[in-house]
Protein backbone atom coordinates (compact mmCIF):
# COMPACT_ATOMS: atom_id res chain seq x y z
CA UNK A 1 0.00 0.00 0.00
CA UNK A 2 1.29 3.46 -0.86
CA UNK A 3 0.18 7.07 -1.27
CA UNK A 4 0.29 9.71 -3.98
CA UNK A 5 -0.08 13.35 -2.95
CA UNK A 6 -1.08 16.20 -5.22
CA UNK A 7 -1.02 19.64 -3.57
CA UNK A 8 -3.77 21.93 -4.82
CA UNK A 9 -2.86 24.97 -2.69
CA UNK A 10 -1.41 25.67 0.76
CA UNK A 11 -4.26 23.92 2.57
CA UNK A 12 -5.92 21.65 0.01
CA UNK A 13 -4.44 18.48 -1.42
CA UNK A 14 -5.52 15.30 -3.18
CA UNK A 15 -4.50 12.08 -1.49
CA UNK A 16 -4.58 8.84 -3.49
CA UNK A 17 -4.42 5.57 -1.57
CA UNK A 18 -3.08 2.70 -3.70
CA UNK A 19 -4.06 -0.77 -2.54
CA UNK A 20 -2.61 -3.80 -4.30
CA UNK A 21 -4.14 -7.26 -4.41
CA UNK A 22 -1.44 -8.49 -2.07
CA UNK A 23 -2.66 -6.02 0.56
CA UNK A 24 -6.01 -7.68 0.95
CA UNK A 25 -6.28 -11.16 -0.66
CA UNK A 26 -5.05 -13.15 2.36
CA UNK A 27 -7.41 -11.25 4.65
CA UNK A 28 -10.34 -11.86 2.28
CA UNK A 29 -9.51 -15.55 2.07
CA UNK A 30 -9.33 -15.88 5.87
CA UNK A 31 -12.65 -14.08 6.28
CA UNK A 32 -14.33 -16.41 3.74
CA UNK A 33 -12.95 -19.45 5.59
CA UNK A 34 -14.39 -18.02 8.79
CA UNK A 35 -17.77 -17.59 7.07
CA UNK A 36 -17.61 -21.19 5.86
CA UNK A 37 -16.88 -22.45 9.36
CA UNK A 38 -19.69 -20.43 10.98
CA UNK A 39 -22.38 -20.71 8.27
CA UNK A 40 -25.03 -23.37 8.01
CA UNK A 41 -26.97 -23.99 4.80
CA UNK A 42 -29.64 -26.49 3.94
CA UNK A 43 -28.14 -29.51 2.25
CA UNK A 44 -24.68 -29.00 3.76
CA UNK A 45 -23.22 -29.89 7.13
CA UNK A 46 -22.03 -26.93 9.18
CA UNK A 47 -18.48 -26.07 8.11
CA UNK A 48 -18.65 -28.26 5.02
CA UNK A 49 -20.29 -25.83 2.61
CA UNK A 50 -18.28 -25.68 -0.65
CA UNK A 51 -15.99 -22.63 -0.80
CA UNK A 52 -17.37 -21.79 -4.24
CA UNK A 53 -20.84 -21.39 -2.69
CA UNK A 54 -19.45 -19.29 0.20
CA UNK A 55 -17.53 -17.13 -2.26
CA UNK A 56 -20.61 -16.61 -4.42
CA UNK A 57 -22.79 -15.80 -1.39
CA UNK A 58 -20.45 -13.60 0.66
CA UNK A 59 -17.49 -12.80 -1.57
CA UNK A 60 -18.27 -9.31 -2.86
CA UNK A 61 -19.61 -8.14 0.53
CA UNK A 62 -16.51 -9.39 2.35
CA UNK A 63 -14.20 -7.86 -0.25
CA UNK A 64 -16.02 -4.50 -0.12
CA UNK A 65 -15.94 -4.43 3.67
CA UNK A 66 -12.21 -5.19 3.86
CA UNK A 67 -11.33 -2.65 1.15
CA UNK A 68 -13.34 0.06 2.94
CA UNK A 69 -11.66 -0.73 6.26
CA UNK A 70 -8.22 -0.58 4.65
CA UNK A 71 -9.06 2.76 3.04
CA UNK A 72 -10.25 4.18 6.37
CA UNK A 73 -7.20 2.83 8.19
CA UNK A 74 -4.78 4.08 5.53
CA UNK A 75 -6.34 7.54 5.54
CA UNK A 76 -6.23 7.74 9.33
CA UNK A 77 -2.62 6.53 9.45
CA UNK A 78 -1.50 9.06 6.83
CA UNK A 79 -3.05 11.97 8.72
CA UNK A 80 -1.61 10.79 12.03
CA UNK A 81 1.87 10.05 10.67
CA UNK A 82 2.07 13.44 8.98
CA UNK A 83 0.47 15.35 11.88
CA UNK A 84 -2.29 16.73 9.67
CA UNK A 85 -5.47 18.17 11.18
CA UNK A 86 -8.41 18.56 8.84
CA UNK A 87 -10.81 21.46 8.78
CA UNK A 88 -13.60 19.27 7.41
CA UNK A 89 -13.95 15.55 6.77
CA UNK A 90 -12.50 14.18 3.49
CA UNK A 91 -14.60 14.12 0.33
CA UNK A 92 -14.13 11.86 -2.67
CA UNK A 93 -12.08 13.36 -5.44
CA UNK A 94 -14.14 14.61 -8.36
CA UNK A 95 -12.28 12.25 -10.67
CA UNK A 96 -12.83 9.21 -8.45
CA UNK A 97 -14.71 6.41 -10.22
CA UNK A 98 -16.79 3.82 -8.34
CA UNK A 99 -14.70 0.81 -7.31
CA UNK A 100 -15.18 -2.36 -9.36
CA UNK A 101 -15.66 -4.89 -6.59
CA UNK A 102 -15.58 -8.44 -8.01
CA UNK A 103 -14.44 -11.36 -5.88
CA UNK A 104 -13.78 -13.38 -9.03
CA UNK A 105 -11.56 -10.71 -10.53
CA UNK A 106 -9.43 -9.17 -7.75
CA UNK A 107 -7.42 -6.17 -8.78
CA UNK A 108 -5.40 -3.24 -7.51
CA UNK A 109 -7.45 -0.28 -6.27
CA UNK A 110 -6.73 3.44 -6.16
CA UNK A 111 -8.95 5.72 -4.12
CA UNK A 112 -8.55 9.50 -4.22
CA UNK A 113 -9.75 12.03 -1.66
CA UNK A 114 -9.75 15.81 -1.56
CA UNK A 115 -8.68 17.00 1.87
CA UNK A 116 -8.66 20.40 3.52
CA UNK A 117 -6.09 21.09 6.22
CA UNK A 118 -6.77 23.53 9.01
CA UNK A 119 -5.32 26.88 7.86
CA UNK A 120 -2.40 28.03 9.95
CA UNK A 121 -2.41 31.60 11.19
CA UNK A 122 -0.81 33.71 13.88
CA UNK A 123 -3.32 34.40 16.64
CA UNK A 124 -3.59 38.12 17.34
CA UNK A 125 -5.31 39.97 20.17
CA UNK A 126 -3.70 38.22 23.14
CA UNK A 127 -0.75 40.12 24.55
CA UNK A 128 0.17 42.60 27.26
CA UNK A 129 -0.42 45.38 24.70
CA UNK A 130 -4.03 44.33 23.96
CA UNK A 131 -6.36 46.31 26.24
CA UNK A 132 -9.74 45.08 27.47
CA UNK A 133 -12.11 46.78 29.93
CA UNK A 134 -12.99 44.86 33.10
CA UNK A 135 -16.02 46.25 34.90
CA UNK A 136 -15.90 46.39 38.69
CA UNK A 137 -19.62 46.43 39.61
CA UNK A 138 -20.32 48.03 42.97
CA UNK A 139 -22.90 46.47 45.30
CA UNK A 140 -25.83 48.76 46.11
CA UNK A 141 -26.56 48.71 49.85
CA UNK A 142 -30.27 48.86 49.08
CA UNK A 143 -30.07 45.37 47.60
CA UNK A 144 -28.71 44.07 50.89
CA UNK A 145 -31.33 45.99 52.86
CA UNK A 146 -34.10 44.54 50.69
CA UNK A 147 -32.81 40.98 51.14
CA UNK A 148 -32.56 41.42 54.91
CA UNK A 149 -36.09 42.82 54.96
CA UNK A 150 -37.37 39.96 52.80
CA UNK A 151 -35.83 37.37 55.11
CA UNK A 152 -37.21 39.02 58.22
CA UNK A 153 -40.69 39.14 56.71
CA UNK A 154 -40.49 35.60 55.34
CA UNK A 155 -39.79 34.14 58.78
CA UNK A 156 -41.73 36.69 60.81
CA UNK A 157 -44.85 35.80 62.79
CA UNK A 158 -48.15 37.24 63.96
CA UNK A 159 -48.69 38.01 67.63
CA UNK A 160 -51.84 39.13 69.52
CA UNK A 161 -52.10 42.89 69.75
CA UNK A 162 -53.71 44.90 72.51
CA UNK A 163 -54.15 48.62 72.50
CA UNK A 164 -55.08 51.27 69.98
CA UNK A 165 -55.21 50.11 66.36
CA UNK A 166 -52.64 51.45 63.91
CA UNK A 167 -52.22 51.32 60.13
CA UNK A 168 -50.00 48.23 60.58
CA UNK A 169 -52.58 46.29 62.62
CA UNK A 170 -53.96 43.06 61.14
CA UNK A 171 -57.69 42.78 61.74
CA UNK A 172 -59.64 39.52 61.36
CA UNK A 173 -63.32 40.16 60.58
CA UNK A 174 -66.20 37.70 60.63
CA UNK A 175 -68.90 39.14 58.35
CA UNK A 176 -72.55 38.28 57.74
CA UNK A 177 -74.65 39.44 54.82
CA UNK A 178 -77.26 42.12 55.62
CA UNK A 179 -80.78 42.60 54.38
CA UNK A 180 -81.80 46.21 55.01
CA UNK A 181 -79.60 46.56 58.12
CA UNK A 182 -80.65 43.20 59.53
CA UNK A 183 -78.74 39.93 59.36
CA UNK A 184 -80.09 38.13 56.31
CA UNK A 185 -81.65 34.75 57.04
CA UNK A 186 -79.45 32.06 55.44
CA UNK A 187 -77.31 34.87 54.09
CA UNK A 188 -73.69 34.65 53.09
CA UNK A 189 -70.99 34.53 55.78
CA UNK A 190 -67.24 34.96 55.40
CA UNK A 191 -64.08 35.60 57.38
CA UNK A 192 -60.99 37.49 56.23
CA UNK A 193 -57.95 39.34 57.53
CA UNK A 194 -56.84 42.77 56.33
CA UNK A 195 -54.43 45.45 57.48
CA UNK A 196 -55.83 48.81 58.48
CA UNK A 197 -53.61 50.38 55.85
CA UNK A 198 -55.47 48.49 53.09
CA UNK A 199 -58.85 50.05 54.00
CA UNK A 200 -60.55 52.93 52.25
CA UNK A 201 -60.26 56.21 54.14
CA UNK A 202 -63.92 56.06 55.17
CA UNK A 203 -63.68 52.55 56.61
CA UNK A 204 -60.25 53.19 58.14
CA UNK A 205 -61.59 56.16 60.12
CA UNK A 206 -64.45 54.00 61.37
CA UNK A 207 -62.47 50.88 62.36
CA UNK A 208 -59.60 52.72 64.07
CA UNK A 209 -62.10 53.61 66.83
CA UNK A 210 -63.14 49.98 67.41
CA UNK A 211 -61.83 47.09 69.53
CA UNK A 212 -62.04 43.30 69.49
CA UNK A 213 -65.71 42.25 69.73
CA UNK A 214 -67.06 45.47 68.19
CA UNK A 215 -69.21 45.36 65.06
CA UNK A 216 -69.64 47.67 62.09
CA UNK A 217 -71.65 47.75 58.86
CA UNK A 218 -69.82 48.04 55.56
CA UNK A 219 -70.10 47.68 51.81
CA UNK A 220 -67.76 44.79 51.01
CA UNK A 221 -66.95 46.24 47.57
CA UNK A 222 -65.91 49.57 49.13
CA UNK A 223 -64.04 48.20 52.15
CA UNK A 224 -60.59 48.30 50.60
CA UNK A 225 -58.87 51.32 49.14
CA UNK A 226 -57.80 49.73 45.87
CA UNK A 227 -59.23 46.32 44.98
CA UNK A 228 -61.06 45.02 41.92
CA UNK A 229 -64.08 42.72 41.93
CA UNK A 230 -61.96 39.60 41.48
CA UNK A 231 -59.85 40.44 44.53
CA UNK A 232 -62.99 40.98 46.62
CA UNK A 233 -64.48 37.66 45.56
CA UNK A 234 -61.23 35.71 45.99
CA UNK A 235 -59.95 37.15 49.28
CA UNK A 236 -62.88 38.73 51.13
CA UNK A 237 -65.77 36.51 50.04
CA UNK A 238 -63.41 33.52 49.79
CA UNK A 239 -64.98 32.17 46.61
CA UNK A 240 -62.71 30.05 44.43
CA UNK A 241 -62.24 31.61 41.01
CA UNK A 242 -63.15 28.28 39.41
CA UNK A 243 -66.60 28.50 40.96
CA UNK A 244 -67.79 31.57 39.06
CA UNK A 245 -67.57 33.26 35.68
CA UNK A 246 -66.30 36.81 35.30
CA UNK A 247 -69.22 39.23 35.66
CA UNK A 248 -71.53 36.49 36.98
CA UNK A 249 -74.14 37.61 39.56
CA UNK A 250 -73.37 35.61 42.70
CA UNK A 251 -76.65 36.48 44.39
CA UNK A 252 -74.75 38.00 47.32
CA UNK A 253 -75.50 41.51 48.50
CA UNK A 254 -72.93 44.27 49.00
CA UNK A 255 -73.73 45.13 52.62
CA UNK A 256 -72.34 43.14 55.55
CA UNK A 257 -72.10 43.39 59.32
CA UNK A 258 -68.61 42.60 60.47
CA UNK A 259 -67.39 41.66 63.93
CA UNK A 260 -63.71 42.14 64.81
CA UNK A 261 -62.66 38.68 66.00
CA UNK A 262 -59.00 39.42 66.69
CA UNK A 263 -56.27 42.00 66.14
CA UNK A 264 -52.65 41.00 65.54
CA UNK A 265 -49.37 42.63 64.77
CA UNK A 266 -46.70 41.26 62.48
CA UNK A 267 -43.31 40.87 64.13
CA UNK A 268 -40.38 40.47 61.70
CA UNK A 269 -37.91 37.73 62.58
CA UNK A 270 -34.85 38.68 64.56
CA UNK A 271 -31.72 37.59 62.70
CA UNK A 272 -29.67 36.07 65.50
CA UNK A 273 -27.66 32.89 66.00
CA UNK A 274 -30.74 30.86 66.97
CA UNK A 275 -32.59 32.00 63.81
CA UNK A 276 -29.77 31.01 61.46
CA UNK A 277 -29.36 27.64 63.17
CA UNK A 278 -33.10 26.84 63.07
CA UNK A 279 -33.35 27.72 59.38
CA UNK A 280 -30.15 25.90 58.32
CA UNK A 281 -28.42 29.05 57.07
CA UNK A 282 -24.67 28.39 57.46
CA UNK A 283 -21.77 30.73 58.27
CA UNK A 284 -23.88 33.40 59.97
CA UNK A 285 -24.65 34.08 63.63
CA UNK A 286 -25.81 37.70 63.38
CA UNK A 287 -27.47 40.12 60.99
CA UNK A 288 -24.13 41.85 60.39
CA UNK A 289 -22.47 38.60 59.36
CA UNK A 290 -25.38 37.72 57.10
CA UNK A 291 -25.17 41.12 55.44
CA UNK A 292 -21.58 40.31 54.50
CA UNK A 293 -22.63 36.92 53.14
CA UNK A 294 -25.26 38.62 50.96
CA UNK A 295 -22.73 41.21 49.85
CA UNK A 296 -20.24 38.50 48.84
CA UNK A 297 -22.95 36.52 47.02
CA UNK A 298 -24.05 39.58 45.06
CA UNK A 299 -20.46 40.57 44.33
CA UNK A 300 -19.65 37.04 43.18
CA UNK A 301 -22.61 37.20 40.79
CA UNK A 302 -21.53 40.63 39.55
CA UNK A 303 -17.94 39.46 39.03
CA UNK A 304 -19.20 36.43 37.13
CA UNK A 305 -21.28 38.61 34.81
CA UNK A 306 -18.37 41.00 34.35
CA UNK A 307 -16.13 38.06 33.45
CA UNK A 308 -18.70 36.84 30.91
CA UNK A 309 -18.71 40.26 29.27
CA UNK A 310 -14.91 40.28 29.21
CA UNK A 311 -14.96 36.88 27.49
CA UNK A 312 -17.48 38.16 24.95
CA UNK A 313 -15.30 41.22 24.30
CA UNK A 314 -12.21 39.03 23.80
CA UNK A 315 -14.08 36.65 21.50
CA UNK A 316 -15.44 39.45 19.33
CA UNK A 317 -12.03 41.11 19.06
CA UNK A 318 -10.34 37.82 18.15
CA UNK A 319 -12.92 37.20 15.44
CA UNK A 320 -12.52 40.75 14.18
CA UNK A 321 -8.73 41.02 13.93
CA UNK A 322 -7.77 37.46 12.95
CA UNK A 323 -8.08 36.90 9.22
CA UNK A 324 -8.43 33.29 8.09
CA UNK A 325 -8.79 32.51 4.40
CA UNK A 326 -11.12 29.60 3.73
CA UNK A 327 -11.67 27.71 0.49
CA UNK A 328 -15.27 28.50 -0.44
CA UNK A 329 -15.04 25.92 -3.23
CA UNK A 330 -14.19 23.08 -0.84
CA UNK A 331 -16.73 24.14 1.77
CA UNK A 332 -19.44 24.34 -0.89
CA UNK A 333 -18.64 20.86 -2.21
CA UNK A 334 -18.52 19.45 1.30
CA UNK A 335 -21.85 21.02 2.28
CA UNK A 336 -23.58 19.86 -0.89
CA UNK A 337 -22.48 16.31 -0.10
CA UNK A 338 -23.79 16.65 3.46
CA UNK A 339 -27.09 18.25 2.40
CA UNK A 340 -27.93 16.88 -1.06
CA UNK A 341 -31.61 17.83 -0.79
CA UNK A 342 -31.08 21.49 0.16
CA UNK A 343 -31.98 24.28 -2.26
CA UNK A 344 -29.34 26.72 -3.55
CA UNK A 345 -30.42 29.58 -1.28
CA UNK A 346 -30.31 27.25 1.73
CA UNK A 347 -26.85 26.02 0.72
CA UNK A 348 -25.65 29.63 0.47
CA UNK A 349 -26.82 30.36 4.00
CA UNK A 350 -25.25 27.17 5.36
CA UNK A 351 -21.94 28.11 3.72
CA UNK A 352 -22.00 31.55 5.35
CA UNK A 353 -22.83 30.11 8.76
CA UNK A 354 -20.19 27.40 8.33
CA UNK A 355 -17.46 29.93 7.56
CA UNK A 356 -18.21 31.81 10.77
CA UNK A 357 -18.31 28.58 12.76
CA UNK A 358 -15.07 27.34 11.19
CA UNK A 359 -13.33 30.63 11.90
CA UNK A 360 -14.37 30.58 15.54
CA UNK A 361 -13.47 26.89 15.88
CA UNK A 362 -10.03 27.60 14.38
CA UNK A 363 -9.48 30.34 16.97
CA UNK A 364 -10.64 28.08 19.81
CA UNK A 365 -8.34 25.29 18.59
CA UNK A 366 -5.42 27.70 18.74
CA UNK A 367 -6.40 28.68 22.29
CA UNK A 368 -6.76 25.05 23.38
CA UNK A 369 -3.31 24.25 22.03
CA UNK A 370 -1.80 27.35 23.65
CA UNK A 371 -3.32 27.00 27.13
CA UNK A 372 -3.94 23.24 27.54
CA UNK A 373 -6.77 23.70 30.07
CA UNK A 374 -8.59 20.88 31.87
CA UNK A 375 -12.01 20.65 33.52
CA UNK A 376 -12.04 18.46 36.63
CA UNK A 377 -14.92 16.74 38.41
CA UNK A 378 -14.48 19.25 41.23
CA UNK A 379 -14.91 22.12 38.74
CA UNK A 380 -18.15 20.56 37.51
CA UNK A 381 -19.42 19.99 41.06
CA UNK A 382 -18.73 23.62 42.06
CA UNK A 383 -20.46 24.94 38.93
CA UNK A 384 -23.58 22.83 39.51
CA UNK A 385 -23.60 23.90 43.16
CA UNK A 386 -23.54 27.57 42.13
CA UNK A 387 -26.42 26.96 39.71
CA UNK A 388 -28.40 25.15 42.43
CA UNK A 389 -27.75 27.96 44.90
CA UNK A 390 -29.14 30.42 42.36
CA UNK A 391 -32.38 28.42 42.35
CA UNK A 392 -32.93 27.68 46.05
CA UNK A 393 -30.67 30.04 47.97
CA UNK A 394 -28.18 28.93 50.64
CA UNK A 395 -30.10 26.00 52.14
CA UNK A 396 -27.66 23.03 51.99
CA UNK A 397 -30.45 20.42 52.00
CA UNK A 398 -32.23 21.94 48.99
CA UNK A 399 -28.92 22.50 47.17
CA UNK A 400 -28.03 18.80 47.52
CA UNK A 401 -31.44 17.75 46.19
CA UNK A 402 -31.17 20.04 43.16
CA UNK A 403 -27.61 18.87 42.37
CA UNK A 404 -28.77 15.24 42.51
CA UNK A 405 -31.49 16.02 39.94
CA UNK A 406 -29.05 17.97 37.74
CA UNK A 407 -26.48 15.17 37.66
CA UNK A 408 -29.09 12.86 36.10
CA UNK A 409 -29.54 15.26 33.16
CA UNK A 410 -26.79 14.19 30.74
CA UNK A 411 -27.40 17.08 28.35
CA UNK A 412 -27.20 19.66 31.16
CA UNK A 413 -24.00 18.09 32.50
CA UNK A 414 -22.37 18.10 29.04
CA UNK A 415 -23.40 21.71 28.40
CA UNK A 416 -22.06 22.74 31.80
CA UNK A 417 -18.78 20.95 31.07
CA UNK A 418 -18.43 22.75 27.73
CA UNK A 419 -19.20 26.11 29.37
CA UNK A 420 -16.54 25.46 32.00
CA UNK A 421 -14.04 24.48 29.32
CA UNK A 422 -14.56 27.72 27.38
CA UNK A 423 -14.57 29.74 30.62
CA UNK A 424 -11.24 28.22 31.62
CA UNK A 425 -9.72 29.02 28.25
CA UNK A 426 -10.79 32.65 28.47
CA UNK A 427 -9.70 32.89 32.09
CA UNK A 428 -6.26 31.81 30.91
CA UNK A 429 -6.42 34.35 28.08
CA UNK A 430 -7.30 37.06 30.61
CA UNK A 431 -3.93 36.53 32.30
CA UNK A 432 -2.11 37.46 29.09
CA UNK A 433 -3.92 40.68 28.22
CA UNK A 434 -3.92 44.18 29.65
CA UNK A 435 -7.06 44.57 31.79
CA UNK A 436 -8.29 48.10 32.37
CA UNK A 437 -10.59 48.25 35.45
CA UNK A 438 -13.63 50.52 35.39
CA UNK A 439 -16.08 50.96 38.28
CA UNK A 440 -19.78 51.00 37.47
CA UNK A 441 -23.22 50.28 38.91
CA UNK A 442 -25.26 47.20 38.11
CA UNK A 443 -27.87 49.15 36.13
CA UNK A 444 -25.16 50.83 34.07
CA UNK A 445 -23.43 47.51 33.52
CA UNK A 446 -26.65 45.97 32.16
CA UNK A 447 -26.82 48.78 29.60
CA UNK A 448 -23.17 48.27 28.63
CA UNK A 449 -23.62 44.50 28.31
CA UNK A 450 -26.65 44.95 26.07
CA UNK A 451 -24.66 47.26 23.77
CA UNK A 452 -21.87 44.67 23.55
CA UNK A 453 -24.37 41.91 22.72
CA UNK A 454 -26.18 44.04 20.15
CA UNK A 455 -22.86 44.97 18.55
CA UNK A 456 -21.79 41.31 18.43
CA UNK A 457 -25.05 40.42 16.71
CA UNK A 458 -24.64 43.31 14.27
CA UNK A 459 -21.06 42.25 13.48
CA UNK A 460 -22.30 38.77 12.72
CA UNK A 461 -24.91 40.13 10.31
CA UNK A 462 -22.35 42.40 8.62
CA UNK A 463 -20.04 39.41 8.07
CA UNK A 464 -22.90 37.55 6.38
CA UNK A 465 -23.64 40.51 4.08
CA UNK A 466 -19.95 40.90 3.15
CA UNK A 467 -19.70 37.21 2.25
CA UNK A 468 -22.68 37.59 -0.06
Image: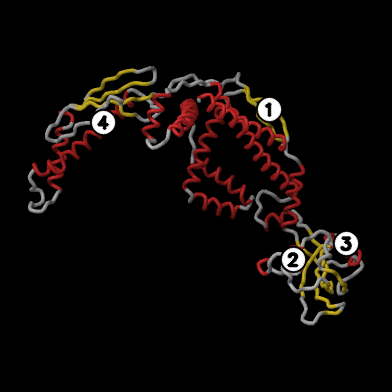
- Mark 3: which secondary structure? loop
> Is any atom of residue 353 visible in this view?
yes
Q: Find residue 71 and name its label.
A: 4
Q: Earlier in the sequence, mark 1 or mark 4?
A: 4
Gap between marks 3 and 4, in whole Å?
Answer: 89 Å
Q: Earlier in the sequence, mark 3 or mark 1?
A: 3
351 displayed left or right of 13: right
Give the foreground label among 1 and 2: 2
Give the foreground label among 2 and 3: 2
Gap between marks 1 and 2, in whole Å?
Answer: 52 Å
Q: Find residue 166 and name its label.
A: 3
Q: Position of residue 465 (x, y in %)?
A: 54, 26
The one nearer the camera, 247 or 433, is 247
Determine whether label 1 and label 2 are within 8 Å by CB. Answer: no
402 displayed left or right of 229: left
Q: Earlier in the sequence, mark 1 or mark 2?
A: 2
According to the picture, the residue beneath numbered tag 1 turns out to be: 437
> Is any atom of residue 368 visible in this view?
no
Neighbourhood count class around disc 3 (C-alpha, 10 Å): few under 14, some 14–19, many 20 upward: some
The one nearer the camera, 78 or 158, is 78
Neighbourhood count class around disc 4 (C-alpha, 10 Å): few under 14, some 14–19, many 20 upward: many
In the rendered image, the vertical position of residue 223 relative to residue 118, given as above or below: below
According to the picture, the residue beneath numbered tag 2 turns out to be: 235
Determine whether label 3 and label 4 are within 8 Å by CB. Answer: no
Q: Residue at x 87, y 67 (%)?
A: 162
Q: Earlier in the sequence, mark 3 or mark 4?
A: 4
Gap between marks 2 and 3, in whole Å?
Answer: 22 Å
Q: Residue at x 60, y 18 (%)?
A: 129
Amino acid sequence: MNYDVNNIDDNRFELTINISKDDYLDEVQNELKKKRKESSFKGFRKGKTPMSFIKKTFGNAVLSDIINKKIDSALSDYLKDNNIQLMLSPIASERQEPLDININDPKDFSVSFDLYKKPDFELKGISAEDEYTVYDIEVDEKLIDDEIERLKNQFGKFEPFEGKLTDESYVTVYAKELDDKEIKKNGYETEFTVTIDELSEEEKEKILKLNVGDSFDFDIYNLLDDADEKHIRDYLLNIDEDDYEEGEDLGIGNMFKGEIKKVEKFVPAELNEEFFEENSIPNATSEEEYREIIRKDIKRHYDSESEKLLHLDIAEKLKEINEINFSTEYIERWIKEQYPDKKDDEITQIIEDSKKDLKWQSIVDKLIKKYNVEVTKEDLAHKLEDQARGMVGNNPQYISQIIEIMMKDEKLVNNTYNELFIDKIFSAVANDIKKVPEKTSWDKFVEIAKKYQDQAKQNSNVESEEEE
